Image (spheres, coloured by chain):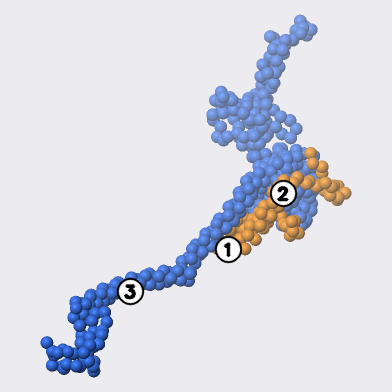
Chain colours: A orange, B blue
């Protein structure tokens, strides 16, 4: 996966995927452009699914000394 | 039983009923308890099916059980609710069977406001006039926050509830907790600094301020003016989840979104990933479907053009023309043949005719052609004299001859 894909937030990836599907639905694109969009869309969908699957809540808390510590998950 | 003890009673053992009865009679002697007015806050209010009202009247230290019979309750001009500050008029007596003393109410008046309620109303009015509650001032809550800040007590159930909801609903987010006291006189200042610390961070997208249920006094920190102003001044959107469903604090009125409980605040803060998953699957499927449709369309376009091309190809014209030429040649041939046949026919006829009138035919019948020595044809006896040389042509040849005597 390219670097830019790694930095993409879930929300941005999802929105881009929606936009791509809308473009393909509208038609009127060349075959080459369509294929390129299709591949990008597949990559985005994979990224979103990956994020969903690996998500686990990260909780941090400010201590009295002003440090931020991570709370263990239950 | 005689109320005044005689020596016989001091040492005997009471039954419960005897004792309770004695106590009731003690109460009923005291004239001051027959007509009392008591100020307090209503709690544990219930209306029995019989129509009788039961509630507790309390102040900050003690409580008093109350009952109002239906006949009196029907005359009440307002509905009684927990938390109401009231003045109850009636008599104090003893419910013997239960062993409790009670205020038997025959009238209830709304109590002049308690200090807290008054303060609440005054602050609410003041802040409303300044525009802190204006809907236009509300910030919108981001749909996909990456980090949620939480201002609450570190040990209380409110935080656990919030984390459970976030974990279940959207584990993609992360959480940053700024612990604080949530009641008592030091709470407002701590709430404000926790809020400002979270608000100042760039990674926090939405802030939840939360506290579990309690009485008006318990929640009082969230009615503090400093807290209200800090919420209003924050740049991040703030969701308040303070107390129970029916509690409304000033913080709730200033916040960008009010939730009835801490759990509800967490629900409002994040999207549900389980709802997003099917949408994601659908998008992925649509991607494939659309791509296939595009390929099919392009394929169809190619085929249509290819067919059109065949139609327009010079080869077709060539084949066409070849065929035409062959056709024409054939016709020409046939025409020529017919003509030939006709001419041959004519020739044959002419030939036959010619043959019929041909001198050669005559010759074959036995006639001869006689020519003189000059080659001139002899037609008459006058043309020759005896001794002339002549040639005689017959059908199959000729010979010479000499004229003899004329016959």
The image quarter in which residue B161 lies: top right
Q: Nearer the viewer, mark 2 or mark 3?
A: 3
Q: Closer to the camera, A31 or B44? A: A31
Q: Secondary structure at mark 1?
A: loop
* Quadrant, the N terminus of chain B: top right
Residue drawn at 16 percent across, 92 percent down: B386
Residue sitting nearer the eye, B223 or B156 = B156
Residue B98 visible at all: yes
Q: Nearer the viewer, residue A15 or B165?
A: A15
Res B336 label = 3
> How many C-alpha atoms fall within 10 Å of the one at disc 2: few (<14), some, or many (≥20)?
few
Query: Is tag 2's residue or tag 1's residue first in the polypeptide sequence?
Result: 1
Comparing B332 with B404, the one in front is B404
Q: Residues within 10 Å of mark 1 (few under 14, many from 20)?
A: few
Q: Work out how far the residue at label 3 is from the one at label 1, CA to CA, in angstroms.
A: 64 Å
Query: How far across and how far down the image is residue B385, in percent?
Result: 16, 94
- The mark found on residue A50 in the picture is 2
Q: Same subunit under labels 2 and 3? A: no
Q: Chain of mark 3?
A: B
Q: Nearer the viewer, mark 3 or mark 1?
A: 3
Mark 2 falls within which chain? A
How far apart marks 2 and 1 lie (CA) works out to 29 Å
Residues flagged by tags 3 and 1 on a common chain: no
Please state the horizontal and vertical placement of residue B324, each as a whole percent of the image: 39, 70
Q: For this view, does A40 lie left or right of residue B332?
A: right
Same chain check for tags 2 and 1: yes
Q: Position of residue B397 (x, y in %)?
A: 27, 82
Kind of element beneath mark 3? helix
Q: How many marks?
A: 3
Name the disc covering residue A29, or none: 1
Host chain of mark 1? A
Q: Residue at x 70, y 46 (%)?
A: B170
């Amino acid at each position: 996966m390219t670097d830019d894909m790694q930095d993409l937030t879930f929300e941005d990836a999802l929105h881009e995927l929606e936009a791509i599907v809308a473009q393909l639905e509208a038609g009127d694109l060349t075959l080459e452009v369509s294929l390129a969009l299709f591949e990008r869309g597949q990559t985005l969908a994979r990224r979103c699914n990956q994020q969903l699957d690996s998500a686990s809540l990260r909780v941090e808390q400010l201590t009295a000394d002003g440090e931020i510590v991570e709370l263990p998950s239950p | 039983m005689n109320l005044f003890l005689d020596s016989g009673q001091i040492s005997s053992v009471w039954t419960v009923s005897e004792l309770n009865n004695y106590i009731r009679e003690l109460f009923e002697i005291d004239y001051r308890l027959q007509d009392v007015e008591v100020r307090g806050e209503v709690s544990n209010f219930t209306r029995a099916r019989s129509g009788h009202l039961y509630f507790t009247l309390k102040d900050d230290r003690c409580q008093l059980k109350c009952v109002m019979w239906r006949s009196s309750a029907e005359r009440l001009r307002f509905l009684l609710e927990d938390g109401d500050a009231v003045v109850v008029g009636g008599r104090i007596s003893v419910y013997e069977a239960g062993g409790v003393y009670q205020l038997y109410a025959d009238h209830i008046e709304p109590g002049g406001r308690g200090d807290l309620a008054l303060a609440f109303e005054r602050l609410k009015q003041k802040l409303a006039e300044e525009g802190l509650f204006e809907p236009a001032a509300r910030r919108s809550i981001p749909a996909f926050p990456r980090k949620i800040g939480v201002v609450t007590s570190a040990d209380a159930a409110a935080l656990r509830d919030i984390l459970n909801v976030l974990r279940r609903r959207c584990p993609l987010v992360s959480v940053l907790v700024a612990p604080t006291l949530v009641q008592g006189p030091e709470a407002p200042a701590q709430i404000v600094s926790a809020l400002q610390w979270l608000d100042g961070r760039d990674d926090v997208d939405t802030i939840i301020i939360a506290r579990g249920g309690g009485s008006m006094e318990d929640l009082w920190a969230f009615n503090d003016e400093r807290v209200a102003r800090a919420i209003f001044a924050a740049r991040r959107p703030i969701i308040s989840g303070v107390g129970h469903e029916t509690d409304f604090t000033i913080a709730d009125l200033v916040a960008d979104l009010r939730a009835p409980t801490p759990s509800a605040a967490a629900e409002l803060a994040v999207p549900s990933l389980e709802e997003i998953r099917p949408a994601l699957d659908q998008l992925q499927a649509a991607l494939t479907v659309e791509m296939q449709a595009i390929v099919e369309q392009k394929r169809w376009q190619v085929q249509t053009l290819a067919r059109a091309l065949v139609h327009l190809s010079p080869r077709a014209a060539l084949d066409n023309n070849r065929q035409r030429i062959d056709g024409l040649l054939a016709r020409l041939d046939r025409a020529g043949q017919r003509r030939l046949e006709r001419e041959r026919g004519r020739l044959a006829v002419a030939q036959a005719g010619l043959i019929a009138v041909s001198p050669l035919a005559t010759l074959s019948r036995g006639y001869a052609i006689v020519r003189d020595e000059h080659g001139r044809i002899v037609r008459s006896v006058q043309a020759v004299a005896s001794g002339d040389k002549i040639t005689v042509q017959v059908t199959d040849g000729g010979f010479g001859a000499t004229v003899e005597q004329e016959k």
